[in-house]
Amino acid sequence: MRKLRLLHLNAGTKIGGTETMLLRFLDRVDRNQFDVFVGAFFPGGELLDEAEKRKANIVLLNQTESANLFQIFKGFVKLYKFLKNNQIDIIQIYGFWTNIGGRIAAKLAKVPIVITGQRTEDTWRKSFHSFLDRFTSRWIDLYVSVFNKGKELLINRERIPANKIEVVHNGIDLYWTSQAANIEKHFPTIGMIAAFNQFKAQEVLIQAAPKIIEKFPSAKFILAGCGNNEKKISETITRLGLNPHFTMPGFIKDIR
């Protein structure tokens, strides 16, 4: 009996929470049961390299984030051919537009099982986005939300049947965290580990920093991560005169 062929399909390759979860999955997946593929549309990050190190098969559909309609169509056709030629049994899709295109391609390629995720509240969604989600939900076998509010939104906003949704919280491997070095600290340290984008709102912590420093003058802040808002965040720290208190080490592979 051949192994099940599982494709995790993401929009980009920059590593954030979703991508970290995917890499943790690759560390633990039963290789005797699954042959795992990891695919993405946009280059520019380390996801596929890290997935390959974990012995996953990788596929880059090679689009740019500013792709025109013709390029998007080519990427869609390439995805369809990949699903068909590699006889993918299960596809799990991340991100709204990747989901819409991935669901259609999976339907045409007759992929037996299609799984999608709800990892944020997606407050940017308009009625048009909800319509597309509902229209293509007929081709979804399972929605996986990482939080209870996500399931509520799928039911109430998108009108997805509750029996098609499971909540699976992101877990913390206590053995993994216990291996971290025990570094003695002589000052209050506040850390934030997140992608630099508008949804993570590092600015809120920065705006709170002066009040914290007023009470704890030696307080230090560490903002770990990378993303499109990195320059803006750095400029805000400088403008508020907080550089002596803030460190931005960038993307950290081993967050311990």
Image (spheres, rainbow, N blue to C red):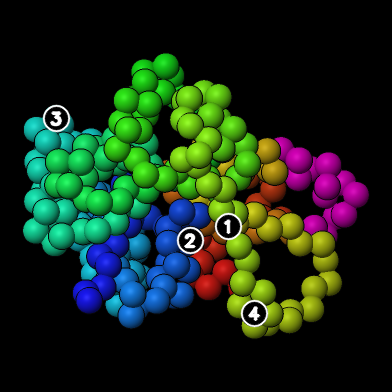
User: Which residue bears the numbered disc 3?
Assistant: 69
Q: Do the residues labelled 2 and 1 touch (CB within 8 Å)?
A: yes
Whichever of callouts 1 and 4 sits on the residue coming sooner in the sequence is: 1
Residue furthest to the right: 215
Earlier in the chain: of badge 2 and badge 1, it is 2
Q: Which mark is residue 175?
A: 4
Q: Is residue 136 magenta?
A: no
Q: What residue type is labelled 1?
A: Asn
Q: How far apart are marks 1 and 4 (CA)?
A: 15 Å
For numbered disc 2, what is the local secondary structure?
Answer: helix
Q: Count the marks: how many?
A: 4
Contact between marks 2 and 4 (CB within 8 A): the answer is: no
Q: Residues within 10 Å of mark 1 (few under 14, many from 20)?
A: few
> Alpha-carbon distance for marks 2 and 1?
8 Å
> Which amino acid, by three-letter code, is at mark 4?
Tyr
Viewer-nearest residue: 126 or 252 = 126
Q: What element carries label 1?
A: loop
Whether 212 is among the magenta residues is: yes
Circle 4 Cα neighbour tier, 10 Å, few/some/many (<14 / 14–19 / ≥20): few
Residue matched to label 2: 21
| Disc on the earlier residue, 3 or 4 | 3
Q: Earlier in the sequence, mark 2 or mark 4?
A: 2
Q: Which residue is drawn at 87% across and 46% down?
A: 214
Q: What stretch is highlighted in magenta?
A: 207-219
Distance between the alpha carbons at the discs numbered 2 and 4: 16 Å
- The residue carrying mark 1 is 170
Residue 167 visible in the current orientation: yes
